[in-house]
Image: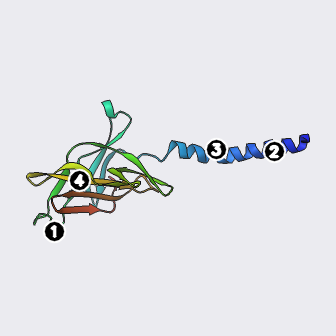
Amino acid sequence: MPPVRRTRSIIAVTAAALVLAPAALAQATGIPKPPLGPWASEGRTIFVLKKGQGKHKGKVLLTDYRLRTEVQVGCPEEPTVARVQGRYPLKKFSRGGYTAWGVGRNVGGEPGPQPAKVKAGDQVYNGSFYVLWNYENATQVSRAVIEFDDCRTELVFAKPK
């Protein structure tokens, strides 16, 4: 191969590497974590994100997760606050080329109901919950659900308080 063509090939490969490297680096480092602190919907705090300590060091934990029940079949007659007991680490969920943060069991690349103790009123139920952040914006929750007994309550938007 003549030296001119070889030089052009090297320049082309180097240019391609410089163009593709930032995209590869962004893919490798992943999406930013949601901000720590309280998150709210319609002015009410629905959960808090905290920095993990001890065995959860380096992780973000969802704590104090609560939603107000609606007046609907299966839910208490009077609206009440349903609280998920415990702390749960955020995980990345990937599906169809998109990645988003969430809490729950992995069901086909999306968070699905995760078993948990749910306190509603004076009673504690075996229930479940999940939370999914917006894949385009880690400062927005796109879906949050709590289920207990025959009651299901959810919201479709939350942001840092």
Q: Amino acid at mark 3?
A: Ala
Q: Which element type, helix, strand or loop, lies under badge 4?
A: strand
Inter-mark Cα distance, 3 to 4: 41 Å
Q: Please give the name of the residue rendered at 30% of the width and 57% of the height, measured from the top-left corner.
A: 144
Relative vertical location of residue 154 with respect to residue 101 in this rendering, above or below: below
Inter-mark Cα distance, 2 to 1: 68 Å
- Closer to the camera in the image, 3 or 60: 3
Q: To which quarter of the image does residue 17 belong?
A: top right
Q: Amino acid at mark 1?
A: Val
- Quarter in which the N terminus is drawn: top right
- Closer to the camera in the image, 101 or 104: 104
**Residue 130 at what x, y percent from top left?**
30, 54
**Residue 7 at what x, y percent from top left?**
85, 41
Residue located beneath label 2 in the image:
9
**Residue 18 at what x, y percent from top left?**
69, 44
Residue located beneath label 3 in the image:
21
Q: Earlier in the sequence, mark 4 or mark 2?
A: 2
Q: Please give the name of the residue rendered at 21% of the width and 48% of the height, measured from the top-left corner.
A: 116
Residue located beneath label 4 in the image:
128
Residue located beneath label 1 in the image:
71
Q: Earlier in the sequence, mark 3 or mark 4?
A: 3
Inter-mark Cα distance, 2 to 3: 18 Å
Is residue 34 something that shows in the picture?
Answer: no
